Image (spheres, rainbow, N blue to C red):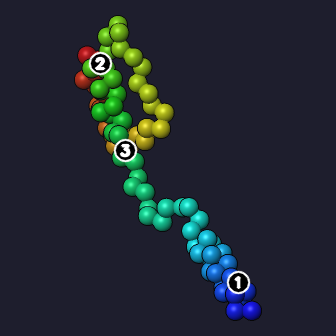
Amino acid sequence: MKLLTKLTAICAMSLFMAGCFDGSNSRAEAPAPTIDFTEFVKTQFDRTTDEAQPANVNGVDLSFNDQNNPQAFDDLLQ
């Protein structure tokens, strides 16, 4: 009977411990850094050549810091 009690206790503890670990990371992940849209566009203008590859913008988090600056891109097309 003592063996059955010990096995039951071990199984119960194993189930309890398995429920505590769900595989998720409890640490908060650092947010991806944002890229300034104005600087991104100006960089793309600087790298224009016949051989330039398109910029991959999938998953890029852009910040629009110059929303109230109508002259933000004036220096690009002069």
Disc 1 crowd, CA 10 A, few/some/many (<14, 14-19, 20+): few
Residue ID at (42%, 20%): 54
Which residue sits at x=41%, y=53%?
A: 31
Crowding around mark 3 (Cα neighbors within 10 Å: few <14, some 14 to 19, many 20+) is few
Q: Is 59 rendered above or below residue 44?
A: below
Calculate the distance from the C-alpha at mark 3 to the C-alpha at mark 2: 21 Å
Name the amino acid, label 3: Thr
Answer with left or right where residue 28 lies relative to residue 52.
Answer: right
Q: CA distance from mark 2 to mark 1?
A: 68 Å
Can you say which quadrant of the picture contains the C terminus?
top left
User: Do tag 3 and tag 1 residues touch (Cβ < 8 Å)?
Assistant: no
Left or right, residue 17 beside residue 70: right
In the picture, the quarter occupied by the N terminus is bottom right
Q: How many marks do you count on the picture?
A: 3
Q: Quadrant of residue 71?
A: top left
Tell me residue 18's x, y (percent): 61, 71
Q: Is residue 65 above or below residue 23?
A: above
Q: Which residue is disc 1 drawn over?
A: 8
Amino acid under disc 1? Thr
Foreground of the two, 12 or 19: 12
Say whether disc 3 or disc 2 marks the residue closer to the N-terminus: 3
Q: Which label belongs to residue 47?
A: 2
Q: Position of residue 77 (x, y in %)?
A: 29, 17
Where residue 47 appears, as percent x and y from the top left, is: 29, 18
Q: Residues within 10 Å of mark 2 (few under 14, many from 20)?
A: few
Q: Position of residue 11 (x, y in %)?
A: 67, 78
* Mark 3 or mark 1, whichever is nearer to me: 1
Q: Nearer the viewer, residue 66 or 34?
A: 34
Q: Amino acid at mark 2?
A: Arg
